[in-house]
Structure formats: C-alpha cells, structure tokens
Image (cartoon, rainbow, N blue to C red):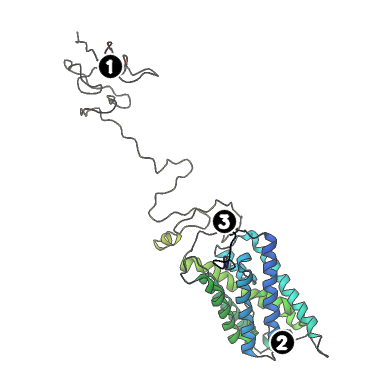
Amino acid sequence: MAYEGYGHLTLEGLAMSDTVEDTPTTGQKFTAEVLGTFVLVFFGCGAAVYSGGDLVATALAFGLTVLVMAYAVGRISGGHFNPAVTLGAVLSGRLPWSQVGLYMAAQLLGALLAGAVLFGLGHGFEGFVAEGNMGQNFFGDQGSGFAWWAALLLELLMTAVFVWVILSVTDARNEVNVALGPLAIGLSLAMFHLLAIPLTGTSVNPARSIGVGVFAGTDAIVQLWLFVLAPLLGAAIAGLTYPVLFGHGAAPVAGSGLNFGGGRKDQFVPGNYEAQWNQGQPASWGQPGAPWGAPPQQQWGQPDPYQQPQQQPDPTYAAPQSSPPQQPGQWGQPAPQQQPAQPAESQPGQWGAPQQPGPQQGQQPGQPGHWGNPDGDDDGRTQVRRPD
C-alpha cells in the first residue's frame, strides 16, 4: 500500500551493477511489520514513561518513529505498523483481505515485544511499579476523568483523519513527491498526540494500546476495549468513504474493499473509475471498469458490441459493382420478372438478369450454374436465353 518504492535509493555514478527488481516475500512483510511496530511502541511509549510526561517529547517520539520506519521498511510492507491503517487500506481497495491476518498478527507481536522489553527495562529502577506506569491509554476515573463516550468519539475522529491523510498522500494521483509521504504521516501522528495525550494518552492504534496495556495492570486491561474499538471504527469510516469522496487513484486490488471472496488476479480491469463516478455511474468494486464513453463490454450470451452489422445488398439497386457481383434478392425472396434480356455484359443481380437456383457448395461466382449465371462458355461470358 503506502510507501512502496521509498527504499530504492541509488547513488548515480557509483552503482555499477544492474538494478535487481525484488518482490518482497510474505516472511519479509511480516518481519518488516513486526520491526516497525516494535520501534513505534518502544520509543513512543518509552518517551512517555522516561521523559517525565513531557508532552512535546512524547508526541515527537511517536511521529518520528513512524517517519523513520516508513523510510526504512516501507518499501517491503507499506509501513502500516497499525491494525487500523491496515483495515483502512483494505476497505479503500489498497490491500487484499487475504493479507489482513498477516499484517495484524505481525503488528500485535511487535507491540507486545516492545511492551515486554519496556516492562523488563523498567525494573532497572529500584522500586519500579509497572501498574499505571507503562505509557498506557486511559479514560474516566482511572485517568484524566475524560468520559468514556467522549474518549471513544475523540479516538474515532482522530483515527479517521489519520487514515484519510495516509490514503491521500499515498494516492497515485498525488503529485507531491512520493518521498514526502512519510513526513506528512509522521507529523500528523505527532499532531494528534499534542492534542490527546492529556485526555486519553492518544491511541489511534490498537496494537500500541494492547502492547503496553497488558503490562500496566487490571484497570488498563479493562479499558482496552475502547482503544481497540474506536480506532477500528474510525479506520473503517475513512477506508470506505475515501473512494466515495475522492475516487480511486488506481484500480482496486483484487479481493479488497467490500469483496470478501478474495477474487482472482484478473478480476479487476483498470479503468477510469473517477470519471465514471463524476458522471453519476461509479464502477462497482467487484466489476470490471472502463473509461467513460467507451463501448460497453460484451456480456455472456450477448452480441459483440464492437462487431459492425453486416450490410445486406439491396435487390433494387442497379449500380455497377467493382468487387464480386451482388446477389439478387434477400432472405429467399425471388427477384422481379424481367422483360427481354439485357446484353450479355449485364451483371448478376441487376435488372434484366434472369434468375436461377442458387450456387452449389464449392462453386464460385462467375462459373456456370452460379445464381444469375446459368450457363457459360469457354471465355466465361454469360449467355442469355430468349424467353419462349
């Protein structure tokens, strides 16, 4: 999805070997998401704990870790580091459903490893107590006193905006330099933390909340439901509404969006989805698209729309033909009876040409026995019999 290509940094003039195109494996994507999420939670939550609650330091720590790790491993996995981002990517058509389990499992593993390391390092201080001291999220009486419904709405709104930002800066139509994408995403995450740290501790990421929450005591664990539900709802809203509001920058990936069946690789035909939407006829995610104004695609059992209808010769038209002679009459209708015969040069199918039974299979026009050419002599000219 997001940062494909950021890692292809070359030094012109120094690279002497040919560039090797590499498609990341499933294991490489898993490892990249584990590593990126680990760094995010370790440094972000670590700053929250060991900076003495410094608001700016904690906000910048979260934003900078996303920025740095997106540059580092974004070319491999897209640099999600967040189950909410993965969900938004799938629902917007950027990632197939078949990879959701892989991404979310890697993110949870990386977050839990970071939480475990922070828990272990905390015991380096004599008398360290992990409960309520792990950079966990909070609301209500166990935190800032912020009501649960207000915390839910805040986290939902921030996550929706976060996913909208990510989908926008990674849109194929965005003319901003692609290398600036992680910068915008990292700064937006820091922006959210500057607002919400005093209210909820800022989640917008279920993995970040779970990774340290399970080590922060019973109260933190009980409150985890809000910091899982709200970000996922916000991401779902952003993922579903982005294509509706702004269209697709490219054809949706097979098996993404509202198509839960997986689909085949050739399920989607690239097309101008935005033009169709603007004309009031949006292309369905599960159906092939085509540019606005293009002929309709052929359906099973329907005639080919690109095939031109065959022109039927008019038996009453007597214009001379430069190509093979036309046949008189159509659909078995006999030509009108003629008056005295025309000269031998008359073309078959013209007025005055006598009619005979049709040609046998394998015969060619101009041969004896051809329809309108009943007899022939050695030079191939038509002989006309005078009626009795």
> Residue 86's image quarter?
bottom right
* Residue tagged 1: 373
Query: Marks 1 and 2, Cα distance to the nearest angstrom?
Result: 103 Å
The residue sitting at the left extreme is 340
- In the displayed structure, does residue 81 sit left or right of residue 270? right
* Residue tagged 3: 254
The location of residue 186, given as percent across then percent down, is: 58, 78
**Amino acid type at mark 1:** Asn
For the question of whether residue 263 can be seen, the reply is yes
Query: Marks 3 and 1, Cα distance to the nearest angstrom?
Result: 61 Å
Query: Marks 2 and 3, Cα distance to the nearest angstrom?
Result: 43 Å
The answer to whether mark 1 and mark 2 are in CB contact below 8 A is no
The location of residue 354, given as percent across then percent down, is: 24, 17
- In the displayed structure, does residue 243 sit left or right of residue 44? left
In the depicted structure, whether residue 52 falls above or below residue 96? below
Q: Residues within 10 Å of mark 2 (few under 14, many from 20)?
A: some
SS for callout 3 = loop
> Residue 386's image quarter?
top left
**Amino acid type at mark 2:** Val
SS for callout 1 = loop
Which mark, by number, is residue 49?
2
> Residue 12's image quarter?
bottom right
